[in-house]
Amino acid sequence: MTEPTAARRVDAESLREAWPVLDADERAEGFNLLDRAEAEEFFNELSARAQAQIVLRLGDPERRLWLRLLDPDDAADLLQQEEVPPEERPRLLALLDPTGRAEVSALLAYAEDDAGGLMSPRFARLRPDMTTDEAIGYLRRQARGNLETLYYIYVLDQHQRLLGVVSFRELFTAPPGSTVETVMERDLVSVPEDMDQEAVAKILADADLVAVPVVDGDGRMRGIVTADDIVDVVQEEATEDIQKLGGMQALDVPYLQTPFWSLIKKRAGWLAVLFVGEMFTTNAMALYEDSLARAVVLTLFIPLIISSGGNSGSQAATLVIRAMALGQVKLRDWWRIIRREAASGITLGLILASLGIARVLVGAHLFEDFGAHSMPLGLTVGVSLIGVVLWGTIIGSMLPFIATWLGFDPASASAPFVATLVDVVGLAIYFTTAELILSGTLL
Amino acid sequence: MTEPTAARRVDAESLREAWPVLDADERAEGFNLLDRAEAEEFFNELSARAQAQIVLRLGDPERRLWLRLLDPDDAADLLQQEEVPPEERPRLLALLDPTGRAEVSALLAYAEDDAGGLMSPRFARLRPDMTTDEAIGYLRRQARGNLETLYYIYVLDQHQRLLGVVSFRELFTAPPGSTVETVMERDLVSVPEDMDQEAVAKILADADLVAVPVVDGDGRMRGIVTADDIVDVVQEEATEDIQKLGGMQALDVPYLQTPFWSLIKKRAGWLAVLFVGEMFTTNAMALYEDSLARAVVLTLFIPLIISSGGNSGSQAATLVIRAMALGQVKLRDWWRIIRREAASGITLGLILASLGIARVLVGAHLFEDFGAHSMPLGLTVGVSLIGVVLWGTIIGSMLPFIATWLGFDPASASAPFVATLVDVVGLAIYFTTAELILSGTLL
């Protein structure tokens, strides 16, 4: 906050600024030019991936320095990055002090996106039968070690089973002579070590906690997950979902840092799948080629009608996917959702149908567009719109359920995917309606 | 964690289960049936909106009880809910104790989505010239008050200006006789009170903090924002963006709790706008009606070609919008993005063009689909695809920038919106290509 600090910071600031456009070598080079105090702050801010890129470009003495600076959960994250060749992992682990090495090795056994993979094994712990004054003195000594957090203090029995939690406030304000047991809160929230990180995020946010304890199958406490790590998790999961909803594979690294060909790979796959799916529209239309030849005017409304189905389907899919991600909609809710979306589809279809009929009639009156057949043509457009929009909302709302049942991420039911599925059937709805209404007049 | 707790919990559990399908009256009724200890936990878990619904349905004595249970930032949130009629606000405020009332009134002056609106005014503070032992004793007395958090302790001068921060760990481990000043960290992260909550979330996540201090224009500390509140913010902002990306207005409340007609209103507006936009495809096609009448086979590829433009545009828009939301892409990056996306568009276009040409040639050989003109027809489809995909990626990547320049949320550049813009031009690209390549043969 003082002037000299502000002046020293310029270098780190400009490195931060340039960061996205630098390659890994340039980053390591820039990092080496920072002074020690700045470098420490800078290093801690970096993603695990960027930390790995830098550490891999340093000699052993510097590697040791930077690895030991990290908390065990962050060191484990670094070692789990793709950039780190498997043969380098034991070498990097060996650079840690014995306690750190044991802690990091234990964390490496968990999947990166489980509670166990997110947790820190360093937390403050007490025995239930200590007095609160003993506890304060004990924490004072324990604090010299490397506790990541002193937000909450956990009370464990001799088998490391979690009995309760106390805050500093409770220890400080307890009547003299009381034991930890009498002031601790027994009714506490904990998560199993294999719980998915999205579920952990939900629990932490619902309970308004800054840290949550992780326990194993026997109720033994293994570590804590803190809210700052959860903020990252929530951002990452939302980014993945958003990219999938946009009709592509999720990126592993920020957009500007994704190499060109890896970006193409993530996009071309889905684009090709959607393209092949959309090829069926060509077949669908070929079936009605005779009708099309007789009434070319029908072709004019094709994009309007099929895109309306796609748009309403995209809305429904997005709503359901996000509600599922937030735990607001469960698999068993599918019947409620389908009824709700069918009612929405009919209502929205009626609204668009009135606009569509108005368009045909206004066109017919002002520009004499559609000859003598504007009334039946308008009716065809209107009826098709109701059918297509209804179909879109039902497909859009059910596809996330179907994806989940088949074992895929519901977010794969992207707007483009829904639109593709809706297009083929949308064309069939349109031409069938046209043949029913227009046969004898235009057809 | 003990058996009796698990048994008592059944009621709260079943209420939680039923919650999404209950109306406000049923919720208040269910809530009143919980026993006191359960009700307290349950109430704290609720969203500010649900808390408001319940409080409004209680008499003054219960209202006082529940309002005083809330931390000042949460009480201020409750009072700012739409559900609370403006004339009720002073009445509810009057139920708080004088300190709480003053704190909540101060918070009500901030916009709900600023740092000021998120912060809690209760934090632990010390003077720089205290010794660490005096500080521990002082905190012990201060803790009897209502400090929301004791995660970090802030050091303020006599004008309440923020000088530094100390953790319990540092106080505990300092050599005897040292002053707070000598152990505090001066180089600390703080945020201004009018900073947007998304920016606060980014700072907190980047710096790995569980709480960040909020200062006013004169450097005076006003409160702290904690990571658990930020988790909620991040989820909410992602939900809003995702719903906008799906081509609709963001919902204010969870999907299943949004009343039917309000859901229709949020969806019908954008759907109608997109429909009117898509009407231009009808005009665009009318311009080429003669070509269409001469070569009906051209119509068969319309959905395939325009949807490819929409899909590639949706990918580009999604990537740029999310990167903007995460602060990875800034407005000044537009030129880098446009070059990158143009290169992506050409590459992706070439991939789809090969698939499209293969489709035409295979169709021609196996089913004798397209008569003698399959080669020029395939070429038309291929060239159009490159043009349309390139156009889609450029429009998709630039629309979020244009939206921002015009003062809209970049997320309004939704997949359906991009697709609609791409469709009209996509048709023009297709028919122009067809007239150039096919004139003299099919046309």
Image (cartoon, coloured by chain):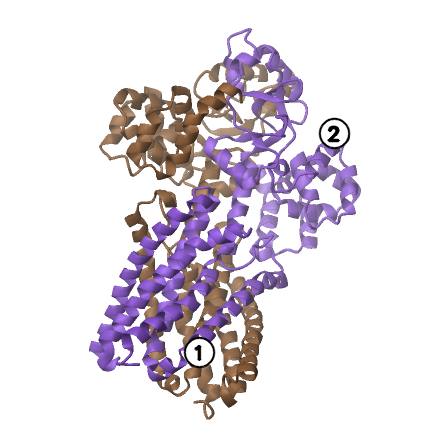
Chain colours: A brown, B purple
User: Quarter of the image containing the C terminus of chain A?
Assistant: bottom left
Where is residue B436 shown, x and y percent of the image? 30, 73
Residue beneath the point at 74% across and 47% down = B56
Does dot 1 land on a helix, a strand or a loop? helix
Marks 1 and 2, the one that precedes in the sequence = 2
Name the residue type under label 2.
Thr
Where is residue B44 shown, x and y percent of the image? 63, 40
Reading the image, the residue beneath label 2 is B99
Q: How far apart are the alpha carbons under marks 1 and 2?
A: 71 Å
Q: Tell me if mark 2 has few (under 14), some (14-19) or many (20+) residues whose alpha carbon lies within 10 angstroms of its own.
A: few
Residue beneath the point at 32% across and 79% down = B297
Name the residue type under label 1.
Ala
Q: Is residue A129 above or below residue A341?
A: above
Which residue is at the front of the view, A162 or A434?
Answer: A434
Q: Is residue B181 above or below residue B10?
A: above
Left or right: A328 in relation to A97: right
Does dot 2 land on a helix, a strand or a loop? helix
Between tags 1 and 2, which lies in front? 1
Residue A46: quadrant of the picture? top left
Are the residues under badges 1 and 2 in a single subunit? yes
Residue beneath the point at 44% across and 86% down = A435
Reading the image, the residue beneath label 1 is B286
Which residue is at the front of the view, B278 or A201?
Answer: B278
